[in-house]
Image (cartoon, rainbow, N blue to C red):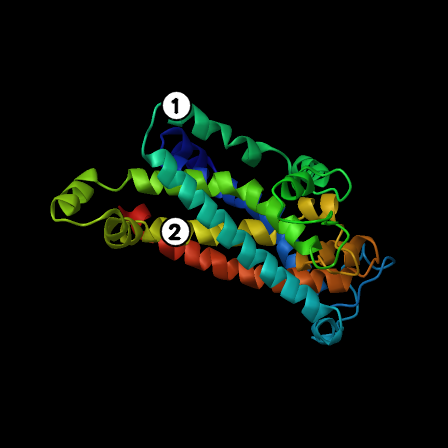
Amino acid sequence: MKRIFSSLADGKGFDIALIVFPFAFLFVMAGLPLVYNVIMSFQEVDMFSLGSFARPFVGFKNYVTLFSQPETWPILKNTAIFVCASIAGQFVVGFGLALFFWTNFPGASWLRGLFLVSWVMPGLVVGAIWNWILSGDFGVLNYLLNTLGIIDGNIFWRSDPAYALWAVIIANIWLGTSFNMILLSVGLSAIPKDLFEAAELDGANAFQRFTTITLPMMRSTIGAVISLGLIFTLQQFDLFAAITSGGPNNASNVTQYWAWELSFRQYDFAQGATISVVMIVFVMIASIVYVRSTRHEVRG
């Protein structure tokens, strides 16, 4: 023990301590709950056995029950639509804004900073704001669409099964666009401007410079943005709780909200844990893609 303290005192073991303490904190606060959740998905759990670790082991019964329920596949489909549409919308709008501010016009810096307001706002606050915007009777969105002549009558975005999921998608795109814009702006700023000047001298137009220089040089950044977008979108819960509550009739329900609903409304903790484990698999895949996308940047 004396040797350990002396090692820390003279600085030789300080780098080890910097790793051990954060790792122990992450293991206790994140690792143990994760392992507990995975184990619970293979057990029979109810309100009376929730506080006990020794519960009946049922194997893959919870997974078989989950995928045999009629609402599982529609909810998985909603999740896929929500994730793909949100990531695509956030990326396209964020990339467009990043290219727009890349021109560095007067006032671009402070105007770009205003877009961060959406990212720092809590999800429940964003949901409350979009509740007013998407209101069927007095919503701003219906007013604008009616004024422009795009629609003839009001659309009940939150209660119509055809629009409920897209109402949350629109709000989530607005919420995550600024994050995409900032990361993509960093990637754009790392591209040497000499490449664009040389290509322009060679006669390449703007589209050719974008496809042959910008996109290839942004490959790692784009991979990181999409991977992080997948992780953040799969854990999005606040907007569903604030806007649609998964309704009507599961039309806007997704796996992350369904897991909470099963666990804390229906008290089916085993099924909630099972859905969480399925989501963890997709998050791990996204994490692997993210690490591979940024690996050479870390080495550099």
Reading the chain from its start, which is encountered first: label 2 or label 1?
1
Q: Against 86, is 10 above or below? A: above
Q: Residue at x 44, y 30 (%)?
A: 112
| Residue 107, label in figure | 1
Rendering coords of residue 35 (x, y %): 63, 58
| Residue 154, label in figure | none
| Element assignment for label 1 | loop
Q: Residues within 10 Å of mark 1 (few under 14, many from 20)?
A: few
Q: Which three-letter amino acid code belongs to the residue tagged 2?
A: Ile
Residues under labels 2 and 1: Cα distance? 26 Å
Rendering coords of residue 252 (x, y %): 71, 57
Q: Residue at x 78, y 57 (%)?
A: 248
**Label 2, on which residue?**
222
Q: Nearer the viewer, residue 82 or 221?
A: 82
Q: Residue at x 41, y 51 (%)?
A: 224
Rendering coords of residue 188 (x, y %): 32, 41
Rendering coords of residue 94 (x, y %): 45, 43
Which mark is in front, 2 or 1? 1
Q: Which three-letter amino acid code belongs to the residue tagged 1?
A: Gly
